Amino acid sequence: MLYDTHMHTRFSTDSRMTIEEAAARGRELGLGITITEHLDLDFPAPEAFVFDVDEYFRAYGDRRSDRLLLGVEIGMRGDLVRENAAVVAGHPFDFVIGSIHVIDRIDIYQEDFYLRRTKAEVYGQYFGQMFECLGGYDFIDSLGHIDYIARYARFEDPEVHYAEFAAALDAVLGRLAEREKALEINTRRLGDADTVAALLPIYHRFRQLGGRLVTVGSDAHRPAEIGKHFALATDMAQACGLRPVYYRDRKPEYVKL
């Protein structure tokens, strides 16, 4: 069974979806689901994107099943490796996504991050932090939305083109492959053909550098977003010779397509 391995419910600051709504949508689509609430410790906005992890397991623990798993999306920062590692080690997550959301204590959603800077400068810093964090965050299972910055960047062409950032991307993808981690195919932006065209060379290169595994996640915050563009995502994985997996008890389970 294919799993949607990235979604957010009411424990995430920016979501109001209930676990009941998520589970119902998963059943409707014939998908398993993994809840992955946002945990960005010391987020620039006070009290945002953190939650009580113990309460999360108290509230959702009895809902865990063959079709519903419990994970977390960790905001990776070099100054918070020890704190994030303690959260992961102290709780029975099925799956851990590592993502870059904050650089130099600025949420990269914010326009301020892009002011008076070139695309090369901004994206270079983004991939540089990603590479550095992958050196310390060996306790993640999958690298989340490698193209996250393209959602919010204030440039005429925000896409992540492999040829434009080959050296930086090779460093990230090589380290990910070396540590036998998965690379997420985040489906949120796959409705745009230009996005797909930009992303395919990155996943091809991941395979060339020794990568084997991908997770597929919608990054849903509403029930209607669950499973969105999944057929395209699995086609991308097959075209690049990558194996879709989901994680249960921190171990990869292969998906039969």
Image (tube, rainbow, N blue to C red):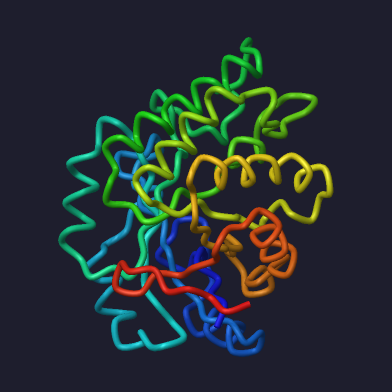
Q: Residue placed farthest to the right in the image? A: 193
State which quadrant residue 218 falls in: bottom right
Seen from the viewer's position, the closer of residues 168 and 149 is: 168
For image coordinates 58% across by 58% down, the residue present is 242
Seen from the viewer's position, the closer of residues 185 and 116 is: 185
State which quadrant residue 234 falls in: bottom right
State which quadrant residue 154 falls in: top right
Q: Which quarter of the rendering shows the N terminus?
A: bottom right
Q: Looking at the picture, how far across and down is residue 141, in whole percent? A: 37, 56
Q: Which quarter of the rendering shows the C terminus?
A: bottom right
For image coordinates 53% across by 32% down, the residue present is 108
Task: State left or right for residue 70 relative to residue 154.
Answer: left
Instruction: Check the image and report above or below for 198 versus 85.
Output: above
For image coordinates 54% across by 79% down, the residue present is 22
Task: State left or right for residue 97 relative to residue 188.
Answer: left
For image coordinates 39% across by 77% down, the residue present is 69
Numbered marks: total: 0
Q: Looking at the picture, how far across and down is residue 104, in whole percent? A: 40, 23
Instruction: Check the image and report above or below for 232 versus 150.
Output: below
Instruction: Check the image and report above or below for 11 versus 49.
Output: below
Q: Looking at the picture, how far across and down is residue 45, in whole percent? A: 40, 38
Instruction: Check the image and report above or below for 34 versus 87.
Output: below
Task: State left or right for residue 206 relative to residue 164.
Answer: left
Q: Residue placed farthest to the top in the image? A: 116
Task: State left or right for residue 22 relative to residue 201.
Answer: left
Q: Looking at the picture, how far across and down is residue 62, in whole percent? A: 30, 88
